[in-house]
Image: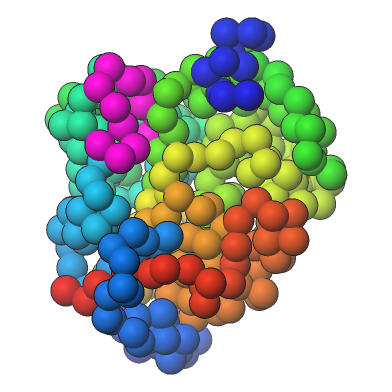
Amino acid sequence: MKRRDFFKKGLSAGIIAGTAITFGKYKNLFAANSLPPEDTFDLVAVKGGEPVQMFDKAIESLGGMKNFVKSGQKVLVKPNIGWDAVPERAADTNPSLVGRVVEYCFNAGAKDVYVFDNTCDQWNKCYKNSGIEKAVKDAGGKIVPGNRESYYQEVEIKEGKKLKKAKVHELVLDSDVFINVPILKSHSSTKLTIAMKNMMGVVWDRMYWHRNDLNQCIADCSTFCKPDLNIVDAYNVMKVNGPRGVSIDDVVQLKSLVVSKDIVAVDAAATKIFGLEPDDISYITIADEMNIGTKDLAKLNINRIIM
């Protein structure tokens, strides 16, 4: 059942905080830069540019935003806006990237483009100080709050093992297109937060997840909340002290972007950019075993772009 149908029915680059940053695995993701025989890609990984320019390259190689957004559609763009922090802290998704995604949606013919998050800090401060509110409004989008339980509708998670139901924001249920735009960063509970974990910002009761096997709940939610496109911001990356961070010293500039329809694959690729392996992140392994997507990048047709 489609979401809409459901609704109608009911920096440094060396050593950070005393920890050496290893780029060996990061380089491996971009080791092969030749195009495959056909030009249809499962995943695009871009390195070396500014956020807007990297997204331009990525969406072009996927055939343009019109492959995802059609004329007259209602689009939800879901960044990470969880924290009251300036963009340089890399606690939230890069605002210029979010604004560019909104622009592309309108250029593809979207009727409305909405942006929200169920924030951890005070929502209006998160929206303003992250720079995302201004970027969205400048691009013509509508930024809406997620701070009231009345915005959320209870749904059944039929394939969930620990998460059997959840209250999900009505925009997730009522939008024609759902675009997930997380930031890659460290996390004290799950090692990393990327695309699948960004879904915690579309539900009301997150504490249940923490009390009932967080990694399994993250995977369970992804059986229901299925973005049409996942765009991972790995330009400035919080390597330590996530998810909130302490200072600018927590951040390293990796100048990367990963885009895919497969939420598991995009998390697996981003994990390698961070310097870890997909098997190091429990919810990626669980989601792969549940056939939500694939963590095995060798099975994918990847376009690797170095700018």
Residue 123 in the image: above or below residue 27 = above
Query: Which image quadrant for residue 215?
Result: bottom right
At horizontal 32% and vertical 74% (from top left) the residue drawn is 36
Q: How many marks?
A: 0
Query: Which image quadrant for residue 29?
Result: bottom left
Quadrant holding the C terminus: bottom left
Question: In x, y percent, where is residue 3?
Answer: 56, 23
Depth check, front residue: 73 or 201: 73
| Range covered by the magenta-colored residues | 66-77
Q: Decide if residue 66 is in sight here.
A: yes
Question: In x, y percent, where is residue 291?
Answer: 69, 55
Question: In x, y percent, where is residue 250?
Answer: 42, 70
Residue 75 shown in magenta: yes
Residue 23 in the image: above or below residue 48 = below
Depth check, front residue: 49 or 130: 49
Side (left or right) of 201 relative to 145: right
At horizontal 24% and vertical 58% (from top left) the residue drawn is 61
Q: Decide if residue 114 is in sight here.
A: no
Quadrant holding the N terminus: top right
